[in-house]
Amino acid sequence: MRKKNIYLKNTSRKLACLLLVTTVSITSLQPVFATRKSQAQDAKKAAESNLNTVNNNINSISNKQQQLQKEINALDAELVSLLVDMNILSDELDQQEVKIKQANEDLSAAKKEERDQYERMKKRIQYMYERGDSSLLEALLGATSMDDFLNRVNYFNAVHEYDRDQLDVYKETKQQVMDLKTQLLEEQSQMEEMQDNYKVQETELKSMVSQKEATMDDFDSQLEQAKVLAAAYQETIQQQNQIIRDEEEKERIAREAAERAAREAAEAAERAAREAADAAQREAAERAAQQAAQAQQQASSGSSPSSGSSSGSTSSSGGSSAGSSSGSSSGASSAPAVSPSGVTGSDVINYATQFIGNPYVWGGTSLTNGADCSGFVQSVYAHFGYSLPRTSAAQAGCGRGVSYAEAQPGDIIYYSGHVALYMGGGRIVGAQSSRTGITTQNATYRTILSVRRIIN
């Protein structure tokens, strides 16, 4: 008995050490994961802030480019209009040149005609002067009648007035041509001045367009740099997201490993406790048998009644102890749940299969939004009024144990660290993994550790 107690103490110490190591491992890993994840989250937050700033800058540059492009378009339109005006003015200057040339030719002709008329008048005056008034007198005296005389007098007067009038006409014509030339030259001067102004405006407009195009090029360069920065920040965010996912996956794996180790440690402790209880029961039975044998020996050798009474008391006590131990062992190995009226295992399976295809979520208990293996079993049975423990290891002790050959729909199939519901026909339904979610598969895909019947 003393050796058994020592064994139980040693086993308890080992299990306590194992649980302590598991706890320390979880505790030591969490700060590492948390630090890396926190650093990645901080880097992601900084990159998102920088990306937001760059995007605002990109929007600002784009707006400025749009406004600048409107200004460039307006200047281009103004420049085009100016060039059209310059072309028209150039044509008008060409036409003005033609007019001035024609005026010069008309002026030269008028001057020549004036000189010719003046020369002809001078010759007639000279002729009359050289001949004297006798020619006039002879012409008058030679008249055959008064009418002829008057006609001759009128002729001489008419010739004189014609010469004078013609001279005046040519003088006036020459003056008109000179005035027209002066006007044309003045107009030409104004056109040339306008043309010079147009050229100045053209130079200024082209300069303004060049400056704005240079500014646009600068905006293009800024925009390109901003886009490069934005792409870099986007890449940083994606990298940090990947780091965060990796760290979360590591946390999940470490957590599942730690829980698996804790469950295995708990199972080991439970097995050790059962073994210790079985050993104690066997030892008590052996001791009772020895006492009974001693009592029989004493009775056969003629021992006193008091000794027989003592032996009978001891035997009775031993029998009571064995019965108590057996009852305790039976209670420890099976914890039957009370079955609500009318519920069958098939009802449980029919309800459970409604949620096939829904997601697996570690630690979850929602049949629609996500559950893990034990959460799925717990929630399915809760629908029918059963209250089961939360973990798979604890669920492995519910109800009563049956063999896999006796398994019926609704029984809980327990594997190492995993549970599912038996459907019948060698199939199970349960929350399998994050990849497959709630699904069905062969019951014997893993080693079955136990089958627990909850109903009946």
Image (cartoon, rainbow, N blue to C red):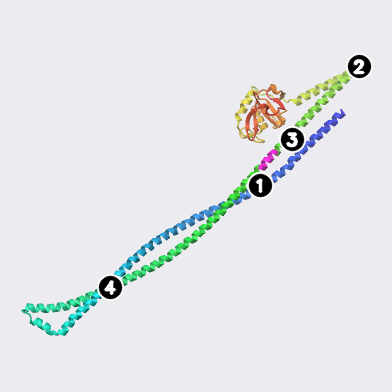
Q: CA distance from mark 3 to mark 1?
A: 29 Å
Residue located beneath label 3 in the image: 261
User: Mark 4 or 2, which is nearer the eye?
Assistant: 4
Q: Amino acid at mark 1?
A: Ala
Crowding near pointer 1: few (<14 within 10 Å), some, many (20+)?
many
Residue located beneath label 1 in the image: 40
> Which residues make up the magenta segment?
246-253
Where is residue 68 shown, x and y percent of the image?
49, 57
Residue located beneath label 2 in the image: 297
First along the sequence among labels 2 and 1: 1
Residue 195 lies left or right of residue 440; in this view the side is left
Q: Amino acid at mark 4?
A: Leu
First along the sequence among labels 1 and 4: 1
Where is residue 338 shown, x and y percent of the image?
69, 24
Q: Does the image show residue 52?
A: no
Residue located beneath label 4 in the image: 107
The residue lying at 17 percent from left, 80 percent from top is 124
First along the sequence among labels 2 and 3: 3
Q: CA distance from mark 2 to mark 1?
A: 82 Å
Q: Residue 225 or 410: which is nearer the viewer?
A: 225
